[in-house]
Image: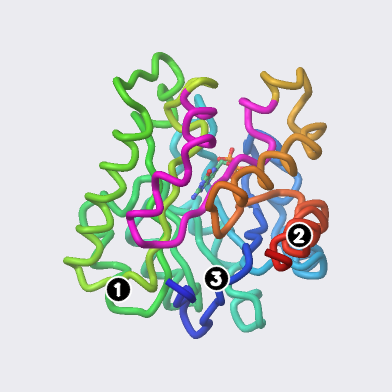
């Protein structure tokens, strides 16, 4: 697992990678409405590239707790124009979607990665991504965004999330997706209480036996609001701390809104680490 095959890109995994978030939505929890206009989305994407993003993740459907699903036409209309403009550049573009039809179109338009909060479990999703050399992110979620925070419950959260991801990795491999293309993600905040999220963050090392790269998305999330009492746009410092802890505990990719701040923190981490 020394690199991630991500479309035509081979991303080295010997230092942590930063995935910058571009939400082309009216209702995302921290930046909803800011980048719904494709021109604004492109400006934001280019800013994140300038700040040193290794991957950009473009999404057209909010999956925040309580979010309503978006129609396939609307999601497509939001995502594709932005993706098409960015795909020719030299930063790999990921599409954040759970819809197989959009996965196919995005790959045809040049997406290098498919990030699916339902771990390619929709009928036809594995087939949609298997043939192209794109990377895939398989995320754990308990329930559906509309209701997932109502009453999340686990007997042993770390074991259950890991077992689910192991089964999804096996399904992906059986569909012909090689391990060098697979990333897994415990899905912070997706059907999890603060205690569940903290247990997962503490125990990321237990995901290592899955033998694939680990992604963590903690940026600006409600758990950080609970810990600091701050609103989403004020959670930058807490997000950087969380990203650093995730990397320290084994994450190879961090999905963040604040690329520059995260890059600075990781520069310090890398420098300390390389002396070991
Ligand atoms: N979190 C969000 C969306 N997609 N994908 C992965 N793999 N991991 C995550 O933790 C993750 C994700 C939620 O964050 P955001 O995109 O900022 O918000 P919204 O869903 O409201 O658009």
Q: Which residues are magenta?
A: 196-224
Disc 2/disc 3 C-alpha distance (Å)? 17 Å
Q: Earlier in the sequence, mark 3 or mark 1?
A: 3
Residue bearing the label numbered 2: 272
Local packing at callout 3 (Cα closer than 10 Å; few below 14, some 14-19, many 20+) is: some
Local packing at callout 1 (Cα closer than 10 Å; few below 14, some 14-19, many 20+) is: some
Residue bearing the label numbered 1: 178
Q: Is residue 95 above or below residue 154?
A: below
Q: Position of residue 28 (x, y in %)?
A: 63, 38
Q: Nearer the viewer, mark 2 or mark 3?
A: 2
Kindly indicate whether the residue at mark 1 contacts the one at mark 3 (C-beta within 8 angstroms). Answer: no
Q: Is residue 255 above or below residue 226?
A: below
Q: Position of residue 273 (x, y in %)?
A: 70, 61
Q: Quadrant of the C terminus?
A: bottom right
Q: Could you tell me which secondary element the residue under label 3 belongs to?
A: loop
Seen from the viewer's position, the closer of residues 250 and 28 is: 250
């Amino acid at each position: 697992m020394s690199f991630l095959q991500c479309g035509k890109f081979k991303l080295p995994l010997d230092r942590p990678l930063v995935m910058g978030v571009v939400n082309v939505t009216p209702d995302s929890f921290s930046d909803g409405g800011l980048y719904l206009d494709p021109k604004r989305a492109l400006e934001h994407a280019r800013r994140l590239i300038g700040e040193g993003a290794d991957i950009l993740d473009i999404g057209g459907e909010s999956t925040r707790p309580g979010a309503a699903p978006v129609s396939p036409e609307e999601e497509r209309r939001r995502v594709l124009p932005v993706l098409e403009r960015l795909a020719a550049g030299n930063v790999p573009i990921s599409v954040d979607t759970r819809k197989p039809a959009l996965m196919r179109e995005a790959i045809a338009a040049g997406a290098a990665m498919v990030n699916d909060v339902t771990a390619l479990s929709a009928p036809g999703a594995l087939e949609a991504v298997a043939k192209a050399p794109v990377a895939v992110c398989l995320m754990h979620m308990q329930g559906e965004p509309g209701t997932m925070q109502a009453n999340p419950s686990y007997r042993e959260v770390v074991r259950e999330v890991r077992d689910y991801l192991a089964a999804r990795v096996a399904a992906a491999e059986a569909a012909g997706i090689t391990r060098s293309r697979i990333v897994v993600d415990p899905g912070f905040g997706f059907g999890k209480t603060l205690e569940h999220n903290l247990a997962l963050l503490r125990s990321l090392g237990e995901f290592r036996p899955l033998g694939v790269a680990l992604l963590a998305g903690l940026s600006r999330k409600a758990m950080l609001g609970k810990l600091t009492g701050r609103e989403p746009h004020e959670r930058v410092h807490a997000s950087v701390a969380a990203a650093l802890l995730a990397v320290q505990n084994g994450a190879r990719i961090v999905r963040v809104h604040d690329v520059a701040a995260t890059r600075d923190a990781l520069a310090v981490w890398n420098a300390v680490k390389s002396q070991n």
